Amino acid sequence: MTTEQLTPLTFSISGMTCSSCVNSIERAVNEIPGVSASVNFASETLHLLAPSSLDAKTIIKQVKSAGYEARLLEDQSNPALHRKGAARALIAAALFAIPAVAISMVMSWHPAINEWLISTFESYSWPQPPHADHNFVSWLVLAITTPLILFVAWPIHRSALRNIFHPTMDTLVSLGAFSAYFWSIYATYSNTGEPYTEVAAGVLFFVILGRYLESRAKRRASSALSSLLALGEKEVAVMRAGVEVIIPISQLVVGDEFVVKPGSRIATDGVVISGYSSVDNSMITGESVPVEVAPGSRIIGSAMNNNGRLLVRATRVGSDTELARITSMVVTAQGSKTPIQAKADKIAAYFVPIVTVLAAFTFEGWYLFGGKSLTYSISTAITVLVIACPCALGLATPIALLVASGRGAQRGIVLRNPRALEASQTIDVVVLDKTGTLTEGEMSVRDFTLSPSASKVLGSEFSNLLTEKNILSSALALESQSDHPTAKSIATFALAQGAAQLPVDQLTQTPGVGVAARVNISGKSPVVLIGSPVSVAHSCIPFDAEITAAIEKAESNSHAVSVLAWDGVALAVFASGDIVKSDAAATLQELHKRGITTWLVSGDNEQSASNIGSQVGIAATHIIANALPEDKLAKVKAMQEQGHRVLMIGDGVNDAAALAQADLSIAMGSGTDVAMSSADITLMRPQLGAVIEALDLSKKTLSTIKGNLTWAFAYNVIGLPIAALGLATPMYAAAAMAISSLFVVSNSLRLK
Ligand SMILES: [Mg+2]
């Protein structure tokens, strides 16, 4: 049995050129004992869970042995590290590119700038560059642009170099920028032909802008692991020789006895030794009603302890816990998705060599066979390279996603994963969680029954007091003292029904039993008791027929039942339960109308699953109850194997693996971070109707992206022959590139 704590680690990976690299890195790293790893191709990151004792260097070495470079990202909680780098690069690029392009474009400034430079250099007796009287402006633009081309754009050149045998879009950008740059140095130095320095600056600026937007849009789902582990407590109060000692959770071992305070999360899986409480497992198991625990009850680490203090003996710690088991399922499921990014790279693999060869032929054609000058032939070849630069292509997807996520955010829909957009088109099966997804996930009073015959038993002195309002007021007086979810639901219900605040005396709370007190009602002070049917029965005369019937009905609906008694006579029954969201049935109807099949897979019992399922219109044969996290995952997998495209909607830790596995996944924003970071889309509104809006928005975004890509490709296809035939100059190519980029932006802004 391992007692070791698992730590999540994130590495940035470089050197990946295609999606098959993902598999070879994962295979290599997973060979290390105790490690479960997944590589994300799009964000170039490796996420893993490793025993705390394992050194990050071991991982880096293992990645290296597979032929790639890994670097530990220090700030594990912040997957936006890449974004910071991209923002810095964008600012630097703008700082150099904007003045370079401005100075080059406004010809009327040139004589004045030239003169000013010459006089300044003369006054300090600085040496002047060759042909300063004509070309000083060109030298200035070169000087401004050099840091951008050599340093700011270095990551692009590095990637081009590394992938020299598998050319990517970076190869083209690097080649285009360098050819324009070196040509400009030559042209300025020899005073022959036009320099195109600003073209290189402009191309790089647009590419870097595209990268920045992309990194912004890709707020990656990679933090699933961190948020799963953050669910666990960091410290725990352990009993050592009868004294409470606070220790870091990593030092907790099996057999330790630890204290769980009311309102805190349970540190690890264990068995209750002493104390009574109700434990909210809903986020982990999907049970809608809090579970009453007593000595001997098994409890799950990271569940919420509601109202009592518990002493618990740890039975599983670290990598053996329920939470760790779910975590490793999430990791595996996330790794199994194939990125669509691979498609773009496949296209690049053909496009880049074709363009390079075309540029070479263009130069040779004009210089050797067309009898044109060196200047003309080179600038035509550069035009080919610049026109082919995939600026609009690089912007097409991120800008559409950026606009879509802005539009979505206004309506409480957070798009996290661009890969999911395509799936939204083809979804034909929806798998839904119950608690917190179809239902509100909170206890409220569903049924309230008053016994009409009670007044006969209590006698004439109470006959005037036995009104519904007084009975509810007495319930409010007791239940407003408690943190128990059932008590809260009764207090809320009583208040909503107009109950009054009454003075309370001699209040006693017995966890697992109920609350008793003397309540002063218009001069009388009956002993009021609220608790579970069994505990109230102990101190009451036998329940009458109405009370018994109400208890049976509530129990068959799997509601939590509370009985209220005055002076040992049961007067009322409260049935508390979760309620279905108001628009759940309508949303499912809309899904059915679109030809989508719905399934309910719940961790809760059969009764409550079929109860909720029938209320929202899910076929009885499509309801699966008592589902463990792995059952949810298995259901999604099974549907996929039958050729279905599955949308999973959930909110809990128990949904995370299924969310990660599904073709498209939507998490409820009221749920756990784990569910949200495993899902492609998060809904910040509780209404289920947002699911339909999210599907529609994804559909529209995808068609915008397709439109953008078509335009960007068309531009390249039309532009290349025009450039090769010498019908355009590099400046024209740069302008056309800017226009096509602007088209992509404005097309994306049309998204609603
Ligand atoms: Mg749930």
Image (tube, rainbow, N blue to C red):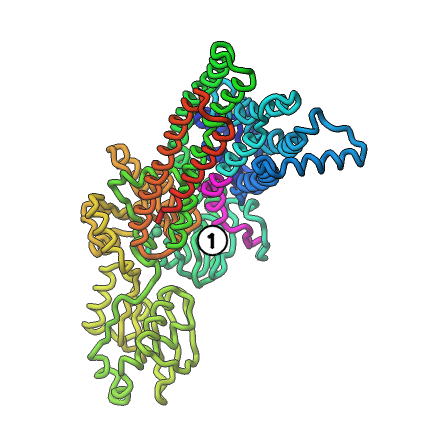
Residue 112 is one of the magenta-drawn residues: no
Q: Is mark 1 within 8 Å of ligand 1?
A: no
Residue 662: image x %, image y %?
33, 39
Residue 2: image x %, image y %?
50, 37
Would you place residue 462 above or below residue 146 in this image?
below
Residue 345: image x %, image y %?
42, 26
**Residue on which disc 1 sits:** 266
Q: Secondary structure at mark 1?
A: loop
Number of dots carrying numbers: 1
Q: Is residue 542 left or right of residue 152?
A: left
Where on the picture, by quarter, is residue 645? top left
Residue at the spot 25% in from the left edge and 33% down from the top edge: 643
Q: Is residue 709 left or right of residue 614?
A: right
Q: Nearer the viewer, residue 180 or 25?
A: 180
Residue 695: image x %, image y %?
31, 46
Residue at the spot 27% in from the left edge and 44% down from the top edge: 430
Q: Nearer the viewer, residue 17 or 185?
A: 185
Crowd class of label 1 (few under 14; some 14 to 19; many from 20; radius 10 Å): many
Residue at the spot 61% in from the left edge and 22% down from the top edge: 187
Whether residue 281 can be seen here: no
**Residue that extends furthest to the top in the rendered view of this protein:** 369
Q: Nearer the viewer, residue 517 or 683?
A: 683
Q: Nearer the viewer, residue 213 or 255?
A: 213
- Residue span colored magenta: 212-240
Whether residue 485 can be seen here: yes
Residue 213 is one of the magenta-drawn residues: yes
Would you place residue 656 above or below residue 445 in this image?
above
Would you place residue 186 above or below residue 6 in this image?
above
Give the amino acid at mark 1.
Answer: Ile
